[in-house]
Image (cartoon, rainbow, N blue to C red):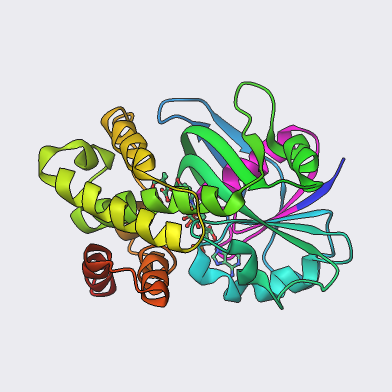
Amino acid sequence: MASVVVIGPGAIGGVLAALAHERGHDVTLAVRTPFDVLRVRSGADGEERSVPAAIRTDPASVGPADWVILTTKAQDTASAAGWLKATTGPGTVVVVAQNGVDQDRRVEGLVHPDATAVPAVVVLGAEAVEPGRIVHHGYGRLTVPDGAWVSGLSALVSGGDDGVEVVGSPDYRTDAWRKLISNAVANPITALTMRRNDVLAEPQTADLVLGLSREVVAVARAEGADLSEDDVTTLRNHYATMPAGTGTSMLYDRLAGRPTEHEYLTGAVVAAGQRHGVPTPLNATMLALLRSM
Ligand SMILES: NC(=O)C1=CN([C@@H]2O[C@H](COP(=O)(O)OP(=O)(O)OC[C@H]3O[C@@H](n4cnc5c(N)ncnc54)[C@H](OP(=O)(O)O)[C@@H]3O)[C@@H](O)[C@H]2O)C=CC1
Ligand SMILES: CC(C)(CO)C(=O)C(=O)O
């Protein structure tokens, strides 16, 4: 049994915490807005399970753990500094399960110097409908760089009918940028239109989806990621077949009136484009709109 602290058990952290608890691990939830018990539902009509993991609101009440899974929004990482300091020690593996690229750099200087920070690409559809109450809309995969942590992370959250697959990648940079295509397309379009993902498959958004994706691929290639037009095609096919009713984390934030993560998604694309002299006019336009929301 491993000790696991999930910092920010909202949509993603709630699902991962439930899985680790149900697999017999000692799970602590490090929360900002308190709730009585974590509840996770698989699918909008599925059965809701209660997850009696320990809930803590004060970093002084926790100590170093084997695993720390950070699932706050990227812009909230700095506000979790107290938790990261209290829960990490020599040997702690800190999985930064957030969208964007270079997630591990976000915790530099915030974790114990002998802890290991591991970035994770999260492919998992989930929604926090209220603090501590999560709907897992479907699928689940964490992609991390190849390394010793892959089997340990699998033991926390994989297996069974509802487990999350953990994949060790030999080319994590490419995987992170591939995921960022989706986050620079789907997240802004759904958040700005206040529509669920079906908006991405409609004819009036087709040129925008294509143009935004191609800009991200061009920037990603300049960053050393091995992406191509095939990745754009794959994404468009994916949008054509997505289950009805799903949305994006940025849409859920906008619906709930919370700050959005755009600086770490569209903002990261525009900033990298500027570094490499790769034009990103469509992403820059989206960024201006997102900043004005
Ligand atoms: N939801 C999804 O389908 C997907 C999300 N992602 C990515 O995963 C990451 C997590 O997203 P998601 O789970 O949707 O986000 P949520 O907003 O649902 O959850 C984030 C949680 O972090 C908590 N939090 C924020 N700051 C702190 C803090 N200082 N201390 C403790 N808790 C804190 C929030 O608390 P409070 O209740 O107070 O707001 C909230 O419960 C993001 O990077 C997102 O882009 C990736 C793939 C899909
Ligand atoms: C589900 C997905 C892939 C949409 O881009 C996502 O990462 C998010 O909601 O943030």
State the image quarter where residue 240 is shown: top left
On the image, the x and y values in percent for residue 266 come to: 35, 64
Of the pair 180 and 72, the residue shown nearer to us: 180
Image point (49%, 70%), residue name: 75
Residue plotted at (38% across, 41% down): 231
Which x, y percent locates residue 53? 72, 46
Q: Is residue 266 left or right of residue 206?
A: right
**Vertical relation: 171 (above or below) 64:** above
Where residue 180 sits, quadrant-wise, is bottom left
Image quadrant holding the N terminus, namely top right
Residue at x 36% of width, y 52% of height: 252
15 in the magenta segment: yes
Residues 231 and 67: in front is 231
Whether residue 131 is visible: no
Q: Number of labelled discs?
A: 0
What percent of the width, then of the height, locates residue 292? 23, 74
Residue 220 percent location from the top left of the image: 43, 58
Q: Is residue 136 visible?
A: yes
Residue occupying the far left of the picture: 204
Name above or below for residue 196 compared with residue 249: above
Tell me the residue at 72%/33% (across/down).
22
**Residue nearest the observer in this picture, 22 or 268:** 268
Q: Is residue 35 magenta?
A: no
Q: In this rendering, would 6 be left or right of 39?
A: right
**Front residue of 216 and 150:** 216
Q: State the extent of the magenta-drawn residues as a range.
A: 5-34
Q: Quadrant of the C terminus?
A: bottom left
- Residue furthest to the top: 161
